[in-house]
Image (spheres, rainbow, N blue to C red):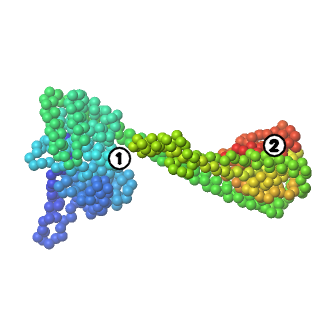
Amino acid sequence: MSAHHHVQSPATTRDDDAGLARWDDDGAPPAQPHSSPNAWLRVGAELGDRLVALSGRQDLLVTCRPGTRSGAPAAYFPALGEVEFDARLFAPLQPHEIHPRIVGDEERYPAAWGVFIHEAAHAAHSIWTQPAGADPRVVEAALLLEESRVEGAHLITRPTDRTYLRTSARTLVMPDIAHPTLQGIEHAAGVAALILGRRDVGILDAGETRAVADLCERVLGADLLATLTRIWSAAHQCADHDATTMLAHGQKWCDALDIAVPALPVPENLTDLLSGAVGVVMDHAAATDAADLAAQAAATNAMAAQSKAQAQNRAQQAGQRRKAAATAKSVFNTRGTTVTPDGTPAPSGNPVTGTRRPTAAEQSAAARLSRALRAAAYRERTEERTTNPTPPGRLNMGRALARDAQRAAGSVPTAEPFTHTRRRNSPTPPLRVGIAVDVSGSMRAACAPVASAAWIVARAAALTDPDSLTATIAYDKHLTALTRPTHRAPERVTTFDATGGHHNLGDAIDALDHGLELSRPGAGRLLVIVTDARYGSDETAQAVSRVKQLTTSGCAVLQLTLTAESRHLPGTTLLHLPRPSSAPAAIATAATDAIRRTR
């Protein structure tokens, strides 16, 4: 079992290179080397650039051409400071298709890149050199142990390279299995070092290497395999420059084999058995890598799909916000005109019948609601107590005595005898109340009480907090603002009638949401929908989606119904009012609860 990927001796000169060095007496131009096409020079130079990051060394040269002087897929020559790389590892890619300088390009040739990483690991960690007069067999054993040691050391600093080292194992190991330099028991021991040694440094998994482990235990015996395992495990802990220890491990390796080999029978066709077992290991590793790659691709696709869905959702929400802003601008116009869903003035159908002065009962109700809202919005002052070793603050005698005792004992005083209390006023939350009233023909009974309730709530909110806002929209298939978002208390009650058809609650909610900022926390927020909800499926779906957005943001949504035939809009709190005249009180109670829940 050779370890030719780390070549301690100087490289030999190829015949082609020797031909370049000879003078041609006939004056003809020198022959070009057939094994080093110019097209691969750039690839070798770019591999050299990447080798700096992989090995941490800047004194190395990378030679890339078809075939190598050592005969191995790749080799590292410490004496020359050179890494030799067989360009045929990139097959079927051509030189112009390979750009190693670009980080990520290696994903197109993982096996070749894994071999290159292996040689980079040698360049970084195979620092020791054999002393003169060392036993060649011991050196060969030490170099065998070096194969898994350098990969394990490389993973410590670059753990993400594990995938490439797994992929390259077939390229590095399989040729040595099929054409061994060692025979019999020593061949099996070499296979154990190359496969199980990579298992113990984390390149291969234990389950993947079971076929080789079982075969080597059967051929070598449990005792010899355990001894060899201890040797390569100890070699994995050896320092990069420690030639003495590595050669000592190589000597132990040879001694263990010399003692055990005479007593161990060599199975017939051992090479075929080892090749088959290693093939099973490589197939399992390839299957695991393929499954991991598929899982990673699936996760990447899922993340991409999620990101795309989120982007589409954000775009949809932004479009909805722009549409809501346009709807609010058109609905809350100063002329009080009725508008269509696209914001253009409606040709007819304005439900507003006029205005009237508020009654004494309505003014009294607005005053009561204002007092109730102020009481609900009141927040106790918060207290924050801190302790200090020095004034200001109230002196705590117990802590003062404890501090004196600590100082007398020679320890650092930690007691803080002064207590300071800081009181802060909590801000009073404003109120945001939007009322959407259905003015289709079936809702005529609600017109008078809702008009009264809209004035009462708007008046009370304005008297409670200057930052409070209310607004009321009447909707059928068109939209009409009965009261607009303003800080001023309304002087008159706007009266209206219900004679429309169809429904457009979705756009009404959008206008109220944008005009009153119902989706924005920091205020007592309430949306009141006065309707029997006898809508078509599309009308219901649009309304429910808006209601869900509001409730998710923390806005309370109340549905007031007047008849037993009314339907419930999903997501709303349903309140059935057999007497329409109780609507103002119900809305006032809901507004008070909304501001009380605000934190």
Instruction: Tell me the crowding category of disc 1: few under 14, some 14 to 19, or many 20 or more residues within 10 angstroms, Cα based.
Output: few
Q: Residue at horizontal 24%, vertical 58%?
A: 60
Label 1 sits on residue: 159
What's the residue type where badge 1 is placed? Pro
What's the residue type where badge 2 is placed? Ala
Q: Nearer the viewer, residue 63 or 568?
A: 568
Q: In this view, does 199 lie above or below 343?
A: above
- Residue 517 % position (x, y): 70, 54
* Left or right of 475 on screen, residue 388: left
Figure quadrant of the N terminus: top left
Q: In 3D space, how far apart are the residues under numbered discs 1 and 2 (Cα atoms)?
A: 66 Å
**Of all residues shown, which one is farthest toward the left?**
133
Q: In this view, does 575 lie above or below 15?
A: above
Q: Nearer the viewer, residue 97 or 165?
A: 165
- Residue 519 % position (x, y): 68, 51
* Left or right of 74 on screen, residue 420: right
Q: Can residue 204 be seen in this view?
A: yes
Q: Residue at horizontal 27%, vertical 63%?
A: 38
* Left or right of 251 on screen, residue 102: right
Tell me the tag on residue 313.
Answer: none
The picture quadrant where one finds residue 572 is top right
Label 2 sits on residue: 586
Secondary structure of residue under mark 2: helix
- Residue 112 % position (x, y): 31, 51
Q: Residue at horizontal 30%, vertical 38%?
A: 199
Instruction: Tell me the crowding category of disc 2: few under 14, some 14 to 19, or many 20 or more residues within 10 angstroms, Cα based.
Output: some
Mark 1 or 2, nearer chain start: 1
Q: Residue at horizontal 12%, vertical 44%?
A: 136
* Left or right of 561 on screen, residue 255: left
